[in-house]
C-alpha cells in the first residue's frame, strides 16, 4: 500500500505547515543539527521505508546552507530506503546562472541539478523557474509549477480596472506578461532596460501606452529591487496613474526593502510565500504576501496519486 511522508526543511516552516494542513498529512521535522564548524547533520526519526517522500525546502537565503541541508536530507532518506524522494523546491536557487554569460564562468544551475540528482532525488517540483531550460538539466522528472493562477486571482479581485496594463520589466518576461494579459483581456507594455553590471540595471524606455493607466508589473523574482524601482519610475514618468508590482519570489536582498519602502513610484508590491518574509518586510504596508500552499499541495497530491499536473502549469 502506498504511503506518503512529508519532510520539512528549515527554510520555510510556515509554508510547510500550511501544505501539511491542506493535505491532512503529518509533517516530519527531521533532527537537523549544525556542528560548531558549520557542518550539517540530519536524522529522520520516522520510518520511511517504502514510502513516497516529499521534501519541502526552498533554496532561499542563506542559499548555500539550505541547499546543503536539502542534499543531506535526500541522502538520509535514500539510505533509509524510501521508495521515492520528491524534492519540492518552491524557490530554485542559482536559477539565474543558467548559461555561460562570459568566458570562464560556471553554469551553476546545471551543477545544482547534478547535485540534487546524484544525492538521490527521484523527482523535482519547483515554482516559476527563472529560466525554463533548467528543466533540461535534469535526467529525472521535473515539474515547473506556475504561480500565475494565484497571482491572477488576486489581481482580478483587487487590482483589475478598465485601464489596467500589464507590464514586463524586460524583454525576457514578455511571454509571462502576455499570459496574464490574455486572462484579464488587457493590453501589455514593456520596459526596455540595459544591464550595466550584476544586480545593476538602468530602465531606458517604455514600449507601449501607459499614460493614465493602472500598470501592473509582472516578474518572477525581486532581488535587490533596483530594476523594479527603475521600472516603476519610468512608468510614472510616462504618465502612469498607478504602479503595482507582482513577483513570485521575494528574495529581497541588500537594500531591496528600503528601496520599496522609500519609492514614491511603487504603490504596492505583491509577492508569494515561496520565500518567507523577514520581519522588516512584513512591517512594510505596501508589501502584500499571498500563499501558494494550495497549488503546491495539489501538485504533491497529484504526483503521489500518479495524476496529471499539467493543469497546474498555467
Image (cartoon, rainbow, N blue to C red):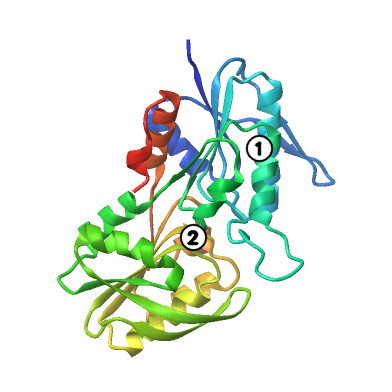
Left or right position of 64 against 235: right
Residue 247 image offset from top left, x and y in percent? 42, 62
The residue carrying mark 1 is 117
Residue furthest toward the top? Answer: 1
- Per the model, the C-alpha gap separating discs 1 and 2 is 26 Å
**Location of residue 192 with respect to 97 vertically, above or below:** below
Q: Does dot 2 land on a helix, a strand or a loop?
A: strand
Q: Is residue 119 left or right of residue 53?
A: right
Which residue is at the front of the view, 237 or 32? 237
Mark 1 surroundings: few (<14), some (14-19) or many (≥20) residues within 10 A: some
Measured as percent of width and height from the top left, residue 33 is found at 73, 37
Q: Nearer the viewer, mark 1 or mark 2?
A: 1
Viewer-side residue, 47 vs 217 = 217
- Disc sitting over residue 250 in the figure: 2
Tell me the residue at 48%/81% (across/down): 193
Q: As displayed, is residue 304 above or below residue 159?
A: above
Q: Which residue is drawn at the image coordinates 40% and 31% (left, top)?
A: 21
Depth check, front residue: 81 or 245: 81
Residue 284 horizontal/vertical position (percent): 43, 67
Count of labels shown?
A: 2
Above or below residue 288? Residue 170 is below
Picture quadrant where residue 163 is located = bottom left
When asked about the image quadrant of residue 187, the answer is bottom left
Report whether residue 66 is seen: no
Vertical side of 220 occupied by 230: above or below:
below
Residue 152 appears at what percent x and percent y?
28, 56
Residue name at image x 48 percent, y 50 percent = 274
Amino acid at each position: 500500500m502506498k504511503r506518503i511522508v512529508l519532510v520539512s526543511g528549515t527554510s520555510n516552516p510556515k509554508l510547510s505547515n500550511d501544505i501539511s494542513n491542506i493535505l491532512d498529512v503529518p509533517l516530519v521535522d527531521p533532527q537537523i543539527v549544525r556542528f560548531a564548524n558549520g557542518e550539517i547533520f540530519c536524522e529522520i526519526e520516522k520510518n520511511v521505508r517504502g514510502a513516497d517522500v516529499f521534501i519541502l525546502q526552498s533554496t532561499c537565503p542563506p542559499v548555500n546552507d539550505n541547499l546543503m541541508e536539502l542534499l543531506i536530507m535526500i541522502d538520509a532518506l535514500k539510505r533509509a530506503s524510501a521508495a521515492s524522494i520528491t524534492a519540492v523546491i518552491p524557490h530554485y536557487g542559482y536559477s539565474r546562472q543558467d548559461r555561460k554569460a562570459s568566458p570562464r564562468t560556471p553554469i551553476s544551475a546545471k551543477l545544482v541539478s547534478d547535485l540534487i540528482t546524484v544525492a538521490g532525488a527521484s523527482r523535482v517540483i519547483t515554482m516559476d523557474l527563472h529560466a525554463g531550460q533548467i528543466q533540461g538539466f535534469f535526467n529525472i522528472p521535473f515539474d515547473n509549477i506556475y504561480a500565475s493562477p494565484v497571482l491572477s486571482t488576486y489581481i482580478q479581485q483587487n487590482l483589475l480596472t478598465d485601464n489596467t496594463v500589464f507590464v514586463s520589466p524586460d524583454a525576457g518576461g514578455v511571454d509571462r506578461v502576455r499570459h496574464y494579459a490574455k486572462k484579464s483581456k488587457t493590453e501589455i507594455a514593456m520596459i526596455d532596460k540595459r544591464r550595466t553590471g550584476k544586480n545593476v540595471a538602468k530602465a531606458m524606455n517604455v514600449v507601449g501606452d501607459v499614460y493614465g493607466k493602472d500598470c501592473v508589473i509582472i516578474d518572477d523574482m525581486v532581488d535587490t529591487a533596483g530594476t523594479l524601482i527603475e521600472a516603476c519610475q519610468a512608468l510614472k514618468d510616462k504618465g502612469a496613474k498607478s504602479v503595482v508590482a507582482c513577483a513570485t519570489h521575494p528574495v529581497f536582498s541588500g537594500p531591496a526593502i528600503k528601496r520599496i519602502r522609500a519609492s514614491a513610484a511603487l504603490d504596492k508590491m505583491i509577492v508569494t510565500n515561496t520565500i518567507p518574509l523577514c520581519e522588516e518586510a512584513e512591517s512594510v504596508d505596501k508589501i502584500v504576501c499571498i500563499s501558494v500552499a494550495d497549488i503546491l499541495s495539489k501538485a504533491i497530491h497529484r504526483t503521489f496519486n500518479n495524476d496529471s499536473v499539467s493543469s497546474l502549469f498555467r
